[in-house]
Image (cartoon, rainbow, N blue to C red):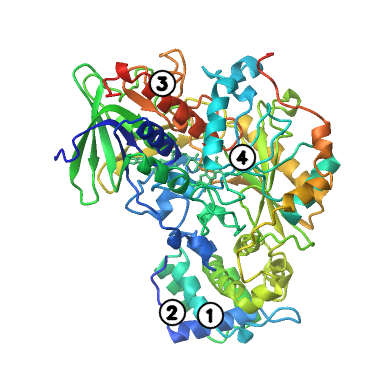
Amino acid sequence: MSDMTLAPADIALLTRLADVLIPGTADMPAVGEIADYADLLRRAVAACGYAAADLRAAIDMIPAEVDWEGAKAFSEARPGSFRILGVIVSAAYYMARPVLDRLKFPDDRRHPAADDEFANEYMTGILDPVTERGPVYRDTRQA
Amino acid sequence: MVDALGHTDVVIIGAGPSGAVTAHTLASKGFSVTCLEQGDWISPADYPGNRPEYELLLQQKWSWNPNTRGRPADYPMNLDAAEVTPIMIAGVGGSSVFYGAHWMRLPPSDFRVRTLDGVADDWPIDYYDLEPFYNRVDEFLGVAGLGGDPAYPPQDYRMPPHPLGKGGMLMAAGLNKLGWHWWPGTNAIPTNKFRNMEKCVRWGVCETGCPAGAKASFDLGYWPHARAAGARLITGARVREITTDPQGRADAVIWIDRDGREHVQKASVVVMAANGVGTPRLLLMSKSARFPEGLGNSSGLVGRNLMLHPNNEVLGLYDEDIESWKGPAGQLLYSLQFYETDRSRGFLRGSKVNLMPVPGILRILEHFDHLPFGKRWGSAIHDIGKYAGRALSLAGNIEDLPEEHNRVTLDPVLTDSDGIPAPRIEYRISENTQRNLDFTLDRMAEMHEAAGAAHILRQPLWKDAPGHLLGTARMGDDPERSVVDRFGRSHDVPNLFIVDGSVMVTSGGLNPTATIAALALRCAEHIAETARFQEVAA
Ligand SMILES: Cc1cc2nc3c(=O)[nH]c(=O)nc-3n(C[C@H](O)[C@H](O)[C@H](O)COP(=O)(O)OP(=O)(O)OC[C@H]3O[C@@H](n4cnc5c(N)ncnc54)[C@H](O)[C@@H]3O)c2cc1C
C-alpha cells in the first residue's frame, strides 16, 4: 500500500492525464463527468503497491499542460513511470459507478443462484455428449 | 525460555487445512491438542474482494507472494533460483483463506505413475485407500459438485453443483464441439447454507477471501469445530525447532511469540502441517547431534522433490454479455481431456484445465499493455474496456514430476523477522513440464476458439501461482527413498508425523487440497489408533 497523499496539484495533473488517456465517447463517460474522480484517484493510490517515491517521481514527470502528443512522448521516454500512472488513472476510472453502469457491472455483488438454475442448464442436454462417451479414467485395479 | 503451556498430547505446527483437519480429528477423540500458527485470524471484514479497488490491493498488501506482502506473519524466501514462486498465506486457515476452492481428487492413475508410465514413483497407497477419507472430508465441508464424472471412479457430493452460468454454458458448448471432456466444477463452496457457512452469492472474488462467508476455507470449515472439540489454537506463534529426547523421540517444540519471547511446548506427538516449504524448513532447522542433517532426514530427501504445478492461462474475451463478474471463482467447469499420459504428445502425464470468470477490469487491460500508444489509449481503451464482464480464464494446472534438484534448503544469509533462516527455493521447470505447458496452452486457445472468443490472450506461465507446495517429505515404504511412511509417520522419529502436501509422492495435475485434507484425516486417525504406542494418553 502506498502511503503517499495526493496534493490538489497532483489530482489536477492526474485528472488532466486521465482526460487525455481515457476520453469520453458516445457510450462512455468522460473523466469530467465522474463527480468523485478525485476521491477515486486517492483510493487507487492508497491501495496500490507502488512505492511512494516511484509514484511521486512519475507524477512529477507529467507535463504541465499534458495533451495527446505529450502523453505519448512521456510513455515512450519513461515507460515504467507512465505504466504506473496508466494503472492509477484507469483504476480510478473503472471504479466509477457511471462507468460500471455503462459496462453493465451491477452495483450489488450478491447474485445467489436460483435453486433450479443448474438443473435447467443440465436439462438442456449440455452434458449428454460427455456422459455418453463413458468412463475415461485408467482403473489401476486392472493395471 | 519459558514453559508456559505445560504438556499436550499432540502439538500441530500450522493451522492451514492439514493442521485444521488433524486438530479436529484428534481433539474429537479426546486428545489434548495444541496448534501453533505463525499467522493470525484474518477477518473477512479485511478481505480485499469487497472493495472496488481490490485488484490494486493484490499488488502488495494482499499479494499472494509473501515476499511482496512482507508481513510479520510471513517468512521471506530466497527466490533467486526459482522459476515459479511458492505463494502462500500465513494465518488460521492457511492458504485456504485465499484459495479458489477448486476441490479435486487425484484419479487412480496418479498413485501408480511408475507402474503406468515408467517415471517417478508409485505411492505406497492407492486411490481406493484414500477414497473413504476423500468422501468424509467432502461430507464435512459440504463440497458442491455433480457425481458421475467419467474421468473418475464413481463419486458424489452432498451439495448440488453451482450453475455454469452464461460463460460456462458457452465454453461447455465449445468443448462439446471439440468432443472433449468437461465437467461442472466441483468446489468447496456450499451451494446452500451449510453448518456455519453461508450459501454462495457468487460474489466472484473467492481467491481474495469470500466476503460472504460462503467458502470452505478452513478457518470457517474446520477450525470452529476443532475448537469446539477442545483443540487449543495459538496464533502469532512461530515454531523454530523441534527437540528430541535421548531416545530420539520428538519431545517438544520451541516457538517464538510476536514480542520475541521463546516458549517450549512439550508434547507426546509432533505433527507438521506447515506446508511443502515450511515443513522441510523446520525439519532442516531441527538439527542435533543425533540428527545432524535435520530431523527425520536420514534419507537426505527432506526438502527435495519440490513440485509446484506451474500454471498457465489463456484469457478469452467474448462479444456476448457473459456476466463474468458473477462467481463462483471457484471453477465453473474443468476439463480432464488431457489429463492422462499420451506419449504421442511428446511428454508424460498431463494437465487439468479449469474455467473461471474474470471479474476484474485491470487484469484485462494489462493484457494489452504491449500495444502501441495509439491502440492502447484514447478512444481505443474503450474497445478493450468493453470486455469487462465478458472475460473467461482457462488455466492449465500442469503435472510436475518429482526431481531431486528442485528443493527447499536453508538460506545461509536471509532470515525472517525472528532471525530464523529463511528457505531458499531451487526450482527449474523441466523439459517434460515445459512441453506439457506448451501443449496445454495451445489446447486452451483452441477451447476459446471453439467457444467463439473474440480475442484470445496467452500467458505462457503464471510465475506467482498456484500455491501448490508438494513433495518435499515424500511418503513411501522404503526409508532410504522416502521421509515418512504410508501414514505420514517419520521413518526416523516414531512420534513425528507430517500431514501437509510435503508427503505427496507425485503431484498429479490437480489442485491438491482435497488430497492433502484426506491424507491428514487418514494420518490423524492412525495417530489415534496407534496412540498406545506413542505414549499418548488415549
Ligand atoms: C491463491 C491461492 C489459490 C489456491 N487455490 C486452490 C484451489 O482452488 N484448490 C486447491 O485445492 N488448492 C488451492 N490452493 C492451495 C491450497 O491453499 C493449499 O493446498 C492448502 O492451503 C495447503 O494446506 P496446508 O495445511 O498443507 O498448508 P497451508 O495452507 O500453507 O498452511 C500452513 C500453515 O503453517 C503455518 N506455518 C508455517 N511455518 C510455520 C512455523 N514455523 N510456525 C508456525 N506456523 C507455521 C503457515 O503460517 C500456514 O498458516 C491455492 C493456494 C493459493 C495461495
Disc 1 from disc 4: Cα separation? 52 Å
Asked whether B501 or B362 is in front, the reply is: B501
Q: Give the image location of residue B500, x and y in percent.
A: 44, 33
Q: How many marks?
A: 4
Decide if residue A69 is in sight here. Answer: no
Say whether residue A72 is left or right of residue B71: right
Q: Which residue is mark 1?
A: A14
Mark on residue B484?
Answer: 3
With respect to residue B200, does B279 lie above or below?
Answer: above
Q: Evaluate whether label 2 is on the same chain as label 4.
A: no
> Residue A106 shows which numbered tag?
none
Judged by depth in the image, the label closer to the viewer, 2 or 4, is 4
**Residue at 55% over, 31% down:** B134
Question: Residue at left 58%, top 41%?
Answer: B143
Q: Image quadrant of ligand 1?
A: top left
User: Can marks 4 and 3 be said to lie on one chain?
Assistant: yes
> Disc 3 or disc 1, which is closer to the eye?
3
Q: Secondary structure at mark 1?
A: helix
Left or right of residue B127: residue B77? left
Q: Quadrant of residue B78?
A: top left
Q: Which residue is mark 4?
A: B158
**Disc 3 or disc 2, which is closer to the eye?**
3
Asked whether mark 3 lies closer than 8 Å to ligand 1, one says: no
- Quarter that holds the N terminus of chain B: top left
Q: Is residue B194 left or right of residue B236?
A: right
List x then y, in percent, for residue B8. 25, 32
Instruction: Give the CA separation, mark 4 to mark 3.
Output: 33 Å
Residue A6, numbered label: 2
User: Contact, CB < 8 Å: mark 2 with mark 4?
Assistant: no
Give me the chain letter of mark 1. Answer: A
Specify the amino acid type for callout 4: Arg
Residue A29 location, x and y as percent?
68, 81
